[in-house]
Amino acid sequence: MDSISQTHIPELWDRRLRGDGVKIGVIGTGIDLLHPDFEGRPINAASLVPGDVQDYVPHETGIVWVLTRIAPNAEIFLVKDRIGEIGSLSTLITACQQLLAMNVDIVNLSMAGDVSYGIDPLSREVNYLTAHNVVVVCAAGNFGPRPRTIGTPGIAETAITVGKVDEHDRVARNSSRGPTRDGRMKPDCVAPGHSIIAAVPRSYGSRYGVYSCTSFATPHVTGALALLKQAYPPASTEELKRAILESCDPASVPFDVHKHEYSTGAGRLNASRAYEVLMKNV
Amino acid sequence: MTNRHGLRDLAEFPFSKIQPEDFRVRIASASPKLLTRVIITTSDPTALAKFYQVKILQAFPHLSCVLCEVAAGEIRRLASSDLVDSIQNDYLKVDVGHGFHLTNAHPRIMGPETPR
């Protein structure tokens, strides 16, 4: 089963949900806008670092590609804040502020930095965005199976922090584990992030690559949220987060070294049931 | 800040405000004149600029933060100041995942076609 069917997203497509009217912000390594699969897609890109918006590591090109598969009509705003893995905290915060000014509904942060107590400037920025009705979805990171390995910004209290499972709903060994240093429950949920086929920049000589990291679990949740936001535009960040977390399916952990929930969170994303929970609660 | 053996005395170094942990170690052992960019959380950036040798490059008032360029030796002074709540390294290295390889497979064989 592919990752999109695994998360029951096609059942939302059957309800004619495509992400219309929803704005998604993505911050990361850039994008190959000339990739053939992006032709005709509503994608905007800007760079806060010297040079163009081109993705020189195969990362955000793939992330945006997954988003365009799940929510093809959502408008995407990509801000390039770094080249590869190296950037600066101030640029990342500036990128968040720019996306807030563009009135995005959801921000996808497929990245994981240092472990903190959730009060570092980036975590506070995430909480600030959430307070301004922007849902922020963050990768848990790939530092498992040791506990307390979720870094910023996934450690932010209001973020939806996503770990990864394989095609059999088993949490991957290296998916970062909770709890946070101050004892909070993280990750919030898990989604498919193992062997995800997605676009790579054309400079790699191939159109597609296979990715295995929590970065690619994250856009599954972001895309599902875009469909839910279209279904009920007035939904608040809290209502959307609750809908996602109250509807998850169980996930297993083949080598549990500590509390099960610190690996799986609420469980694996079920977008179809999230829709039902959202429409029941609003 | 050296002890009687001529070594830097880490016991006197105000650790807890400087984040992340590996940055503390680097600042503790860095040349005092080494310029570095940090994000300082403070309720009073004006006083910060007045009393300490910091060059404020950008302000994030909604987070009570300022991006500063400051010498490593001054960071040690700042860390012991009541004006400063935290000092965060601006340099950011993020994990973007390493599990990647190219494929000739087309994604359409992996799942349903995205609707138009």
Image (tube, coloured by chain):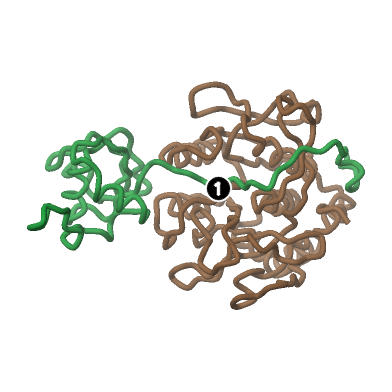
Chain colours: A brown, B green
Residue A103 placement: quadrant:
top right
**Residue at x 46%, y 54% (from the top left corner):** A114
Q: Which residue is mark 1?
A: B95
Residue under the image location 41 percent in, 39 percent down: A90
Residue found farthest to the front? B5
Residue B83 is situated, as x and y percent measured from the top left of the image, at 19, 52
Relative height, residue A219 to residue A41 (above, below):
below
Q: Would residue B3 be found to the left or right of residue A67 on screen?
A: left
Please give the name of the residue rendered at 43% of the width and 70% of the height, measured from the top-left corner.
A182
Count neighbours of disc 1 (C-alpha within 10 A) and say few if under 14, some if 14 to 19, many if 20 or more: many
Please tell me how many numbered marks the rendered image carries. Answer: 1
Inspect the image, locate mark 1, and give the three-letter code of the amino acid beneath it.
Answer: Asp
Q: Nearer the viewer, residue A40 or B33?
A: B33
**Image quadrant for the N terminus of chain A?**
bottom right
Quadrant in the picture for residue B48: top left
Where's residue A124, x and y in %? Answer: 43, 54
Work out whether residue A217 or residue A160 is closer to the camera in this orientation and state it: A217
Give above or below for A90 relative to A193.
Answer: above
